[in-house]
Image: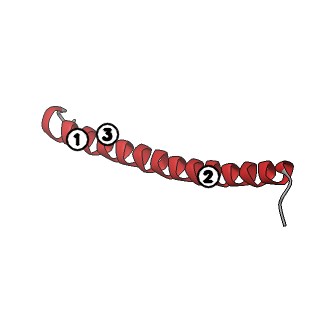
């Protein structure tokens, strides 16, 4: 049985929505990973900077 063009169009729209959701999920995961890695790297560099260059105040 042949489908009407309208039914085919709706099926294509549903497929594109599924693809968009999948792409959005991948992008969100990538963004979260990138932000976490950046924050971790900044924290490590800051700690290293403090160890090497900041003079600690010694209690009397």
* Residue at x-position 67% and y-position 55%: 18
Neighbourhood count class around disc 2 (C-alpha, 10 Å): few under 14, some 14–19, many 20 upward: few
* Of 58 and 19, the residue lying toward us: 19
* Of 35 and 4, the residue lying toward us: 4
Q: CA distance from mark 2 to mark 3?
A: 34 Å
Specify whether residue 60 is in view.
no
Give the label, 2 or 1, closer to the camera: 2
Question: Which image quadrant: the C terminus?
Answer: top left
Instruction: Say left or right for 56 vs 11.
Output: left
| Label ID, residue 19 | 2
Query: Where residue 19 sits in the image (x, y, percent)?
Result: 62, 52
* Of 10 and 5, the residue lying toward us: 5
Whether the residues at callouts 2 and 1 have beta carbons within 8 Å, the answer is no
* Residue at x-position 80% and y-position 51%: 10
- Outermost residue on the left side: it is 52
- Outermost residue on the bottom side: it is 1
Give the label, 2 or 3, closer to the camera: 2
Q: Which residue is mark 1?
A: 59
Q: Give above or below for 51 relative to 26.
A: above
* Residue at x-position 22% and y-position 41%: 59
């Amino acid at each position: 049985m042949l489908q009407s063009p309208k039914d085919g169009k709706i099926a294509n729209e549903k497929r594109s929505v599924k693809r968009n959701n999948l792409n959005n999920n991948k992008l969100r995961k990538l963004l979260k990973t990138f932000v976490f890695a950046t924050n971790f790297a900044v924290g490590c560099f800051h700690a290293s900077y403090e160890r090497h260059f900041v003079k600690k105040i010694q209690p009397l």
